[in-house]
Image: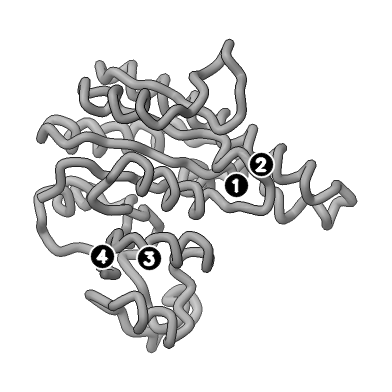
Amino acid sequence: MYKRILLKLSGEALMGNQQFGIDPKRLEQYTSEIKATKNLGIEIAIVVGGGNIFRGVQAEESGIDRVQGDYMGMLATVVNGMALQSALEKAGLFTRLMSGINMEQVCEPFIKRRAVRHLEKGRIVIFGAGTGNPYFTTDSAASLRAIEINADVVLKGTRVDGVYSADPEKDPHATRYSSLTFQEAYEKGLNIMDMTAFTLCQENKLPIIVFDMNKNGNLLDIAQGKRAGTLIN
């Protein structure tokens, strides 16, 4: 179904049932899902958030400057990227960690052509440090990197099985959408991604699929063209 995908994972997803940090069991589950998808011959890029360690938007509440807090959040995404890279390599997959902020001892700087070449050689590329700029979320980074590497789709892995009319964890009457246009999602005020990320995908005709990453086999099903989650196109 897809030749090249960009998988967006939230930092909170890596916590599993913990209150903080990285759950080894959740990391192992995600690694298994990614490996099964990679075995189909699909090129995979990943953007991971840092909310399980630090969120820039929470910085101001603790008296930290917003810009400083955002950079702290970017470093948290690199920590998660290193953990994911280690887990994937332990499973026998070749990976490269690339960062929007230069830190040569830890990872490569993001260079578009180099990232594409890694993908063409069959390596999984993990993008850390967001866009490298404050005031941009990792959703925006996922959209931007997907466009830069010419990905076919953005797969946003969450803990719910798609986009709902309301928060399904709070409203038992919330209904799930199987598909939406960008315009419909905008008019309904659905909180799929932040507006910058959403607009980038819309303007570049890049589809988004929101799905439950915690359900075994979901990522593999989507990669094979089976319907799961919500498609925004």
Picture layout, residue 127 above or below residue 2: above
Going from N to C along the chain, the mark reached first, 2 or 1, is: 1
Secondary element at tag 1? loop
Contact, CB < 8 Å: mark 3 with mark 1? no
Q: Nearer the viewer, mark 2 or mark 4?
A: 2
Contact, CB < 8 Å: mark 4 with mark 1? no
Rendered residue at 38%/38% (across/down)? 46
Contact, CB < 8 Å: mark 3 with mark 4? no
Picture layout, residue 169 above or below residue 101: below
Please state which amino acid type lies under the numbered disc 3. Answer: Glu
- Mark 1: few, some, or many residues within 10 Å (few <14, many ≥20)? many
Instruction: Give the labeled residue for mark 3.
Output: 203
Rendered residue at 61%/29% (across/down)? 101
Secondary element at tag 4? loop
Going from N to C along the chain, the mark reached first, 4 or 1, is: 1
Instruction: Give the labeled residue for mark 4.
Output: 229
Going from N to C along the chain, the mark reached first, 2 or 3, is: 2
Contact, CB < 8 Å: mark 2 with mark 1? yes
Q: Quadrant of residue 166?
A: bottom left
Please state which amino acid type lies under the numbered disc 4. Answer: Gly
Q: Nearer the viewer, mark 2 or mark 3?
A: 3
Residue 30: percent from left, percent from top:
33, 38
- Give me the disc on residue 51: 1
Instruction: Give the labeled residue for mark 2.
Output: 73
Contact, CB < 8 Å: mark 2 with mark 4? no
Please state which amino acid type lies under the numbered disc 2. Answer: Gly
Q: Is residue 117 left or right of residue 164?
A: left
Q: CA separation, marks 2 and 1? A: 7 Å
Please state which amino acid type lies under the numbered disc 1. Answer: Gly
